[in-house]
Image (cartoon, helix red, strand yellow):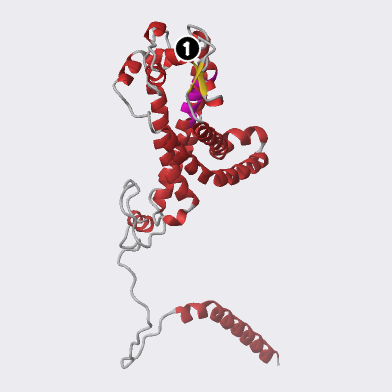
Amino acid sequence: MQYLIHMSRKLLWLGALMLLLLAFTAPQLMAQSVRPPGNAVNLDDGTEPGPSNALGDVSDTEIWDQFRGGDPANLLGPALDGQAMTTTGQQWRMVRENLIRKYLGWLPLIVIGLLAVFYLIRGPMRISAGRSGKTIPRFSHNARLAHWFMAAVFIILGLTGLIILLGRPVIAPYLGLQANSILTSAAMQGHNLFGPLFIVALVWLFIKFVRGNFFQLVDLKWIFKLGGFFGSHVSSRQFNFGEKSWFWMVILGGIVISATGILLLFPWLVDDIRWLQLSTILHALAAVVLIAVAFGHVYVGTIGMEGSIDSMLKGEVDENWAKEHHDLWYEEVTGKSAKEETS
């Protein structure tokens, strides 16, 4: 009896050991491939073999070039069909952020500073013979209305445009992001609203003032004598070289601003986004340059030259002012000589 009990215990231990060995060896046995029989048929599993090179046959650079649509350095190349990215977006952003916003806004401030220094050194240009008390007509009511209409639209667009361009680096650090967001949003609405009126003002200004603003040989003397700002007399017709230059800057710069503004208001007019990127840069450049030069125009027309503002406020100027600054025009209008008084 004891012998049977002893043998039963050995069999139980042996069975447990076999079960333990089977638990450890079964996964390895199942993982081994089974050799197919000699008459087995190999069926296609539907998969294709991968590339011979684990990294692929196309480099990362080529992949990104295809994704972008071409060489990023080729700014003027034609845009490829179906491209997912533009090659000029990064260049446009860098020009706008690192050049336009960072430096262009200083130009009007530099001009204001130079004019202030000039005024402190030179002072206003007085009428050397004093006011005569007699006036002659210079600009008609219609011409003055065209001038002031352009001035009003220009000031509105200039202020709103500068807020849009320089709001984040100038306004936001001092008034906060929320205030800058409100001001920029309002400026954008006003800019878009008054933008088309600038085109109307530009055409009206051109029609009323183009006559007499073509350059002539007499303008060379004005250049050589620096416009008479340092005391010497300079002969001039109805408009001198400085006024003519300002007129054509407004017309040509205004054409650039108008054309680019139309594209920015109606972006669907062009298929290539690079025209819109270029438009934002040219629009800002032309506008800020005109704003800066406009300060010089305002200075001469107000505190910089005695009697100059009368031409646009009253439409008439003092005779002595006309003899001193536009003697050839004075002689044409009055038929009198201005040489004795201006020599």
Q: Establish if 157 lies above or below 323.
A: below
Residue 94 appears in view: no
Front residue of 262/197: it is 197
Main secondary structure found in the magenta portion: helix
* Percent coordinates x, y for residue 155 in the rendering: 55, 34
Asked whether residue 51 is drawn in magenta, I would say no
Front residue of 319/78: it is 319
* Percent coordinates x, y for residue 92 in the rendering: 43, 44
Front residue of 306/57: it is 306
Tell me which corner region of the image, top left, top right, bottom left or bottom right, holds residue 271.
bottom left
- Give the residues in magenta: 291-302
Q: Establish if 294 lies above or below 343.
A: below
* Residue at left offset 42%, top offset 45%: 259
Secondary structure of the residue carrying numbered label 1? helix
Tell me which corner region of the image, top left, top right, bottom left or bottom right, holds residue 3.
bottom right
Q: How crowded is mark 1: few (under 14 residues within 10 Å), some or many (20 or more)?
A: many
Asked whether residue 300 is drawn in magenta, I would say yes
* Percent coordinates x, y for residue 292 in the rendering: 48, 28
Residue lying at the far front in this picture: please name it. 335
Residue 258 appears in view: yes
According to the picture, the residue beneath numbered tag 1 turns out to be 320
Residue lying at the far right in this picture: please name it. 1
Disc 1 marks a residue whose amino acid type is Asn
* Residue at left offset 70%, top offset 93%: 1
Task: From the viewer's perspective, tell me whether residue 118 is left or right of residue 52.
Answer: right
Q: In which quarter of the image is the C terminus?
A: top left
Task: From the viewer's perspective, tell me whether residue 330 is left or right of residue 62.
Answer: right
* Residue at left offset 41%, top offset 53%: 273
Task: From the viewer's perspective, tell me whether residue 186 is left or right of residue 108.
Answer: right
Q: Establish if 308 lies above or below 150.
A: above
* Percent coordinates x, y for residue 49 in the rendering: 33, 74
* Residue at left offset 52%, top offset 10%: 132
